[in-house]
Amino acid sequence: MIKKSAAALAALLLIVGCENNDSNKTSEETVNENPSTFKEIGSITVGGTAAAEISAYDETTRKLFTVNNSGVNKIDVIDLSIPSRPVLIASIDLTVYNGAANSVATFNGKLAVAMESTINKQDPGKVVVFEASNYALLKEITVGALPDMITYSPDGKFILTANEGEPNDTYLQDPDGSVSIIDVASNYAVATLNFAGFSSQLANLKAKGFRIASPSNNFAADIEPEYITVSADSKTAWVTLQENNGIAKIDLVSKKIADIFPLGFKDYSLTENAIDISDKDATVAFNPWKLKGMFQPDGISNFEVNNVQYVVTANEGDAREYSAFVDVKRINNSSVVLDPTIFPNATALKVDAIMGRLNINTKMGDTDGDGDFDELVAFGGRSFSIWNAGTGQLVFDSKNELDKKANEAGLYDDGRSDDKGVEPEAVYAVKMGDKQILFVGLERADAIMVYDISNPVAPKYLQTLKTGDAPEGLLFIPASKSPTKRSLVLASCEGDGSIKIFQPELN
């Protein structure tokens, strides 16, 4: 067997947030697969709740590394040489590092783990780098508070973490949200960027749907980075700012935050956006409502079509609930007063089987400052969206199709109608043959939906895959890097600690 060159290895791994590098495509990657025919070929369960959050694959060792926080904080190591029969072969104990793992990434035989502090969650976190072959420690690097996601750039030169910087329950400690950029070749030197430089733009950002709201209204501390995706040329990164309803663009050459894109609102009064908003109406009924939704993306991925860069987001939504600050209430709460002119039927709307059970943001919607709600703003878009990566302009939104397709498949959880529907958690865009394919992980439907996004303005639904409980992370292994020489999609499911492995048929 001929040993692969370093250049070939540079493109070997695709994980959530570490995208396919089209510039590294070679003829060996051409496999005539049908992306609408994925089927489950293997499965492994490594524990219970929180046992399989995020996974990363190392081609040099054919090992899968999975975050397991179901008991002792560790990374489970799975032999994926035969994907239909995955085998748990080892675990890496992380307790000695005084941190809890949130995410993992691999590149060329190296494993990087993002860890929040277990001494004080608001303290700086760390990245711990290991050899994938023998789990030997290579480096510990200090990063920002609560690194929630980690990824390598496609060329392997950088490790990036999205540092969420959540406050403590009393808001007496609220570290800055930040992004850490680790230069691998420079002995893992780190630059941690915060968002303070954009505070002067707050009024303009808020006018376009960006959200800053906390007891202190501290701009830098209020921003909470969630997920990262890096361009194929490793020069640009995009970071979701979920609670803030935005995306940040980062120049990796200069190591500076280049822009913040506020994402605006989704209009649920439009027929194409009709949603089911009650878990107490004994049915699944999609209707338009006088309601807005913040997109609030969690997962993000990027792709290119006709020399135009795009990012795609999983619009999960998220509220803040601390003892010192809560921004969510149901419409039926007595403290939620609807403007009688705008909502003349307020009493009827507040019934549980109508709008009463819906969770709304209580820090938005009082547009005239008189103490009642002139508009209602919900959490999340219940969709995936495609945005122009250079301008932040919306190119496509899946409207209510994820909920509807899940319902048609018998996978829609009506008990989540009042909250965020199927709850899109993760997205992964990848090239398969001549098509650009998207995988969307749905946390509350326990499913992956597959789309052809070769035409970014008109994606086509291909199929739905049933996963384990609450898929948190998606992983794609291209055919050329796969043990089976066929593409593989893996879902890491934190609800039941399972990892599901899917493979497509050949055309």
Image (cartoon, grey):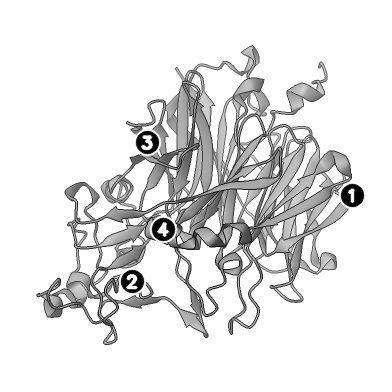
Q: Report the residue at 40% width, 45% height from top.
A: 384
- Residue 353 falls left or right of residue 30: left
Foreground residue among 464 and 392:
392
Callout 1: SS: loop
Three-letter residue code for mark 3: Gln
Question: Along the polypeptide, which appears first: circle 1 or circle 3?
Answer: 1
* Residue bearing the label numbered 1: 136
Q: What residue sits right under mark 4 in the picture?
A: 444
Return the disc, 2 or 1, that comes first in the chain's sequence.
1
Where does label 3 land, which residue? 463
- Residue drawn 35% across and 78% down? 329
In the image shown, does 1 or 199 lie closer to the viewer? 199
Left/right placement of residue 104 relative to residue 93 reads left
* Quarter of the image where the N terminus is located: top right
* Residue at 55% across, 17% down: 31
Q: Earlier in the sequence, mark 1 or mark 4?
A: 1
Amino acid type assigned to the residue bearing label 4 in the image: Arg
Could you classify mark 1 by the number of other residues whose Cα lies within 10 Å: few (under 14), some (14-19), or many (20 or more)?
few
Earlier-in-chain disc, 4 versus 2: 2
Residue extending farthest to the front is 200
Q: Earlier in the sequence, mark 3 or mark 4?
A: 4
Say which element carries label 2: strand
